[in-house]
Every structure is written in structure tokens, then in C-alpha cells.
Image (cartoon, rainbow, N blue to C red):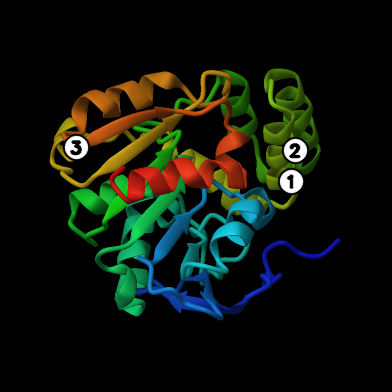
Amino acid sequence: MENPWTRIPEVAGTTVESKMIEMDDGWSIRVIRWVPENDSGSAPLVMVPGWNSVYEGWQEIVEEWAPRRRLTYIETREKGSAVSKGRLTKSSLSVHRSVEDLKRVVEEFPEISSGGDWFASSLGATVILEALAERAFKPRSVALLAPNTNFDFPLWSRLLIMMPSFVYPPLVRLAILILDFKLKEEGQRIRYRRTLLASNVKRLRLSAMSQFAYTMKDETISSIEDRIALLTAKSDSLHSDDDVMLLSEGLPNSQLIEVPSNQFAHDAEVIPILEDFQYGN
């Protein structure tokens, strides 16, 4: 099977570039960019996938959007595409470290620093909110799927995460079985199975441990004035509605959008809904 962290996904009607962006602590993260062969001049798009998400989970959206709008796809450092130097630590995989990475990517690609439309999920959505509070970029719009204000891992997953990494591989299989039982949506089950099987075990474990103590501050939320759509799905049993409702009440310029399912928000069918919001309809 092709390595999802080294594959450069080509999309018909576009040219694609994969670039490693080096950070000040020696890490490098991967950014993939698609430019339409017939660029209409539309506002650029930026996608920041969720925790350890592989490209295949977002492929339908990319293949629909990229031939008509410039698209930048940012893989955060817990993913297997990132390159690290030195000893791995929890602090090197924190939310705030990923915010610094995002600032560096914006610096590298100035066209996404203002006027673009951003779309992110879970951990990627959390990183974007923290970056917006620091005025790291000025978007035209931001759409967030299942953002987290904290990471309330269930007890069973905390127990797995805290175990030594050498016993982790068989536990990944156990986690897949538990998720297969817990998740209602078939598409979501498939995506998380891919994610776990493609994970860098030690990195993913430390990333999860770094998030145990994370909580987004109320003043962070209230300081964000950008236009934000909060996407939620009642059938999503893995992400809590509580975070979305908290953000909906606290973000001064937000709009709540309910979609049929978490999987729907990974399919091309969600694009008209996102574009209605992006264009202010």
C-alpha cells in the first residue's frame, strides 16, 4: 500500500506542489498546494485537517475544489509527513507549537495571509482558533468542523495512550475494534481506521498526552471577531456538541451550521454549503 505521508496527490486540471516548511525548532511540516490550470481568480482556499488525518479522508473535497480554486493543504506536525529533529517531547507536539507552525506557513505563502477561505476539523480547527486570537492571518471566512476547546479523551483511550509505546501496535488494533463499535457512521469508521494504521505511534502518543492539559481560554474565544461557521453533526458520537455550543455562544461573529453527518462534511456535497457561507449568502 502506498505511504499516505509521502504520496503527492495529483488532481486533474491542476498542477501540484508538495513542500516541506522548516520551523525554528528544526521540525518540518508538509504543505501541499494545487493551482488550477484555468485559475478564475477566486479567493484562495486553505485546509487544515484534523488530528493525524490522512489525505484520503478529504480527497473528494480536494478533487472538487482544486480544479477551480487555489488550494493549500497544511499537515500539522503530529502527522507522519512531518520531519523531526532530536528527542520527541510533549511540548514539541502541543497545540501552541502548531500555532507557531501555522504562522510560519502563512509567512512562506503570503497569498493566504488575508482574504482567503479556511476549512479545518478537530485539532486543525483548534489550532486555527488559537492563531486567529493572535491575529496570525486575516481570512475572509473560516469554517470549522467539530472544533475542540479541550480534548476530553474517553477513559479507555487515556489508558491506551499512557501505556509504553512498545506495547502500542497491538493496542492500535484494539482501538480500531472499539471505534468500529462506537462510531455510527461507516465513512467515519473507515477514516479513523486509516488514521490509526498510518500513525507514527510514538509521535501520536506524545501528541495526545500534550493535549490532556489543553483548554481554550474564554478570553481567547471572545477576542476572535472573524466570520466563522461552526459545523456540527448530531450523529457524530466521537466529537461533543458541547464544544460547538460553547464556541457558538462565545464567538461574536459565528454561525452554527448543522450537517447530516460527520462523513457528509468530508464529501464534496458539503462544498455548496461552505461556499454559501464564504460568499456571505
The quarter of the picture where the C terminus appears is: top left
- Give the spatial CA distance, label 2 vs label 3: 34 Å
The image quarter in which residue 256 lies: top left
Between 27 and 183, the one nearer to me in the picture:
183
Mark 2 or 3 closer to N-term?
2
Nearer the observer, disc 2 or disc 3? 3
Between 12 and 238, the one nearer to me in the picture:
12
Residue 253 in the image: x percent, y percent?
Answer: 19, 37
Q: Amino acid at mark 2?
A: Ile
Is residue 90 shown left or right of residue 255? right
Pointers 3 and 1 in contact (C-beta within 8 Å): no
Q: Amino acid at mark 3?
A: Asn
Please tell me which residue is depicted at 33% across the width and 69% down the height of the picture. Answer: 112
Is residue 106 shown left or right of residue 179? left
Nearer the observer, disc 1 or disc 2? 2
Is residue 196 shown left or right of residue 231? right
**How many discs appear?**
3
Secondary structure under the numbered disc 2 in the rendered image: helix
Q: Amino acid at mark 1?
A: Arg
Secondary structure under the numbered disc 1 in the rendered image: helix
Mark 3 or 1 closer to N-term?
1
Circle 1: is it few (<14), some (14-19), or many (20+) Cα within 10 Å?
some
Q: Which mark is residue 190?
A: 2
Circle 2: is it few (<14), some (14-19), or many (20+) Cα within 10 Å?
some
